[in-house]
Image (cartoon, coloured by chain):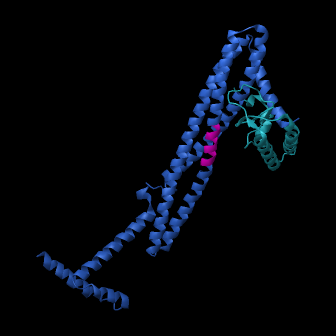
Chain colours: A blue, B cyan
């Protein structure tokens, strides 16, 4: 038999089972209305849960993007300082971060669509619950046993199907957010362990430490050079470096500077 | 005739479209029986696309049950089997 037909029969059988359980048709109405309100609460919580998960992923994506940008800059810095090994390390970490980012992007899109679906389901259910309440009051006010059962069954079957659909949607969303939480938790752990380069990981960042060290020694050299120039001896060491001259040459050049500084101090 | 796509809501469809939809549904059924997930995904997508194309959305506050109910877009064959075999799967 047709898949479409079979699914609808399953839904209807479910509704009939509930109807059969209740003796007074009016009781059916109130009972059903209660569970509709509960389901509405549940679907709204579902929307909020999915939104929370989505925001968490968003946050992690931002962190990873910053991290990727930072690693990129480090690679450039390292390369311009002639440290290809360091640049290679930074780029390989960046590629790992990019992989995580691509994965998160997929999860993000899926959560977004889940959120939209649940929001739609919540709106449809709200409209149907409102309609059901009106119908319920009308039936109760004009209640005659003969016709009531049919009208109640109609209303109940209609909303019961919606409730089944919404219930399934909530289950799917719950499954997805659960998976997402596990993933987000795993990424948080990776960041905490330093395996994924976190932007705020400062002291643990060995690439930056190496770059800083190189930068600092470069600054010292540069400052030294500048001082020598100021003291009128700047050109001498540069020439010596360039000509790859005798190794002892820099020493005499440095000595007068020391003496001069010492003299100034007196 | 009212048709529901799980997770999307109800659509009103002209009765004249039944034959066409039944043909698409038969392919879905065949894929299920042949245990062919790829064919199932394609068949489901074709069926849903057609229903969306010819269907008009039913008012949100309507309380009509659907004549036909279709699995959600990303449903797997396994999910549909569970839906059909175990009515306990439907909550509420």
Q: Count the numbered circles shown.
A: 0
Image height check: is A74 above or below A4?
Answer: below
Residue A99: % across, % down: 59, 58
Res. A244 visible in picture:
no
Q: Main secondary structure of the magenta part?
A: helix
Which residue appears at 35% of the width and 72% of the height?
A: A217
Residue A100: % across, % down: 58, 55
Q: State which quarter of the image contains the C terminus of chain A.
A: bottom left
Q: Nearer the viewer, residue A105 or A133?
A: A133
Q: Quadrant location of residue A236?
A: bottom left
Which residue appears at 33% of the width and 89% of the height?
A: A240
Q: Quadrant location of residue A30?
A: top right
Image height check: is A15 above or below A233?
Answer: above
Residue B84: % across, % down: 81, 33
Based on the picture, tell me whether residue A111 belongs to the magenta stretch.
Answer: yes
Q: State which quarter of the image contains the N terminus of chain A.
A: top right
Res. A103 visible in picture:
yes
Residue A56: % across, % down: 53, 45
Q: Which of A255 and A226 is in front in this view?
A: A226
Q: Which residue lies furthest to the left in this view?
A: A266
Based on the picture, tell me whether residue B24 belongs to the magenta stretch.
Answer: no
What is the magenta range?
A108-118
Q: Nearer the viewer, residue A226 or A154?
A: A154
Which residue appears at 61% of the width and 40% of the height?
A: A115
Q: Is residue A174 left or right of residue A234?
A: right
Q: In this view, does A219 lie to the left or right of A140?
A: left
Q: Quadrant location of residue A209?
A: bottom left
Which residue appears at 14% of the width and 77% of the height?
A: A264
Q: In this view, does A2 lie to the left or right of A177?
A: right
Image height check: is A86 above or below A124?
Answer: below
Q: Which residue lies furthest to the top in this view?
A: A144
């Amino acid at each position: 038999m047709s898949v479409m037909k079979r699914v609808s029969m399953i839904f209807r059988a479910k509704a009939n089972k509930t109807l059969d359980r209740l003796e007074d048709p009016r009781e059916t109405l109130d009972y059903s209305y209660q569970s509709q309100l509960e389901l509405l609460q549940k679907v709204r919580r579902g929307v909020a849960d999915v939104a929370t998960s989505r925001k968490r992923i968003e946050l992690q994506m931002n962190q990873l993007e910053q991290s990727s940008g930072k690693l990129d800059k480090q690679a450039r810095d390292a390369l311009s300082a002639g440290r290809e090994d360091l640049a290679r390390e930074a780029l390989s970490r960046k590629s790992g971060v990019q992989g995580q980012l691509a994965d998160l992007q997929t999860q993000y899109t899926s959560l977004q669509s889940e959120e939209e679906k649940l929001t739609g389901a919540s709106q449809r259910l709200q409209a149907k619950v409102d309609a059901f309440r009106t119908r319920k009051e009308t039936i109760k006010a004009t209640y005659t046993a003969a016709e009531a059962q049919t009208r109640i069954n109609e209303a109940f079957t209609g909303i019961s199907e919606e409730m089944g659909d919404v219930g399934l949607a909530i289950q799917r969303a719950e499954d997805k957010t659960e998976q997402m939480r596990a993933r987000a938790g795993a990424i948080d752990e990776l960041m905490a362990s330093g395996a994924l380069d976190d932007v705020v990981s400062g002291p643990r960042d060995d690439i930056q430490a190496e770059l800083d060290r190189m930068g600092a020694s470069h600054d010292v050299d540069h400052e030294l050079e500048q001082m020598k120039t100021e003291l009128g001896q700047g050109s001498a060491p540069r020439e010596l470096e360039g000509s790859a001259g005798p190794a002892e040459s820099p020493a005499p050049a440095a000595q007068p500077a020391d003496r001069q500084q010492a003299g100034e101090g007196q | 005739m009212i048709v529901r796509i799980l997770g999307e809501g109800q659509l009103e469809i002209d009765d004249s479209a039944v034959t066409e939809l039944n043909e698409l549904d038969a392919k879905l059924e065949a894929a299920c029986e042949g245990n062919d997930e790829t064919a199932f995904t394609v068949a489901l997508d074709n069926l849903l696309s057609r229903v969306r194309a010819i269907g008009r959305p039913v008012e949100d506050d309507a309380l009509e049950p659907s004549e036909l109910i279709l699995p959600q877009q990303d449903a797997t064959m396994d999910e549909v089997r569970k839906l059909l075999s175990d009515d306990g799967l439907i909550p509420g």
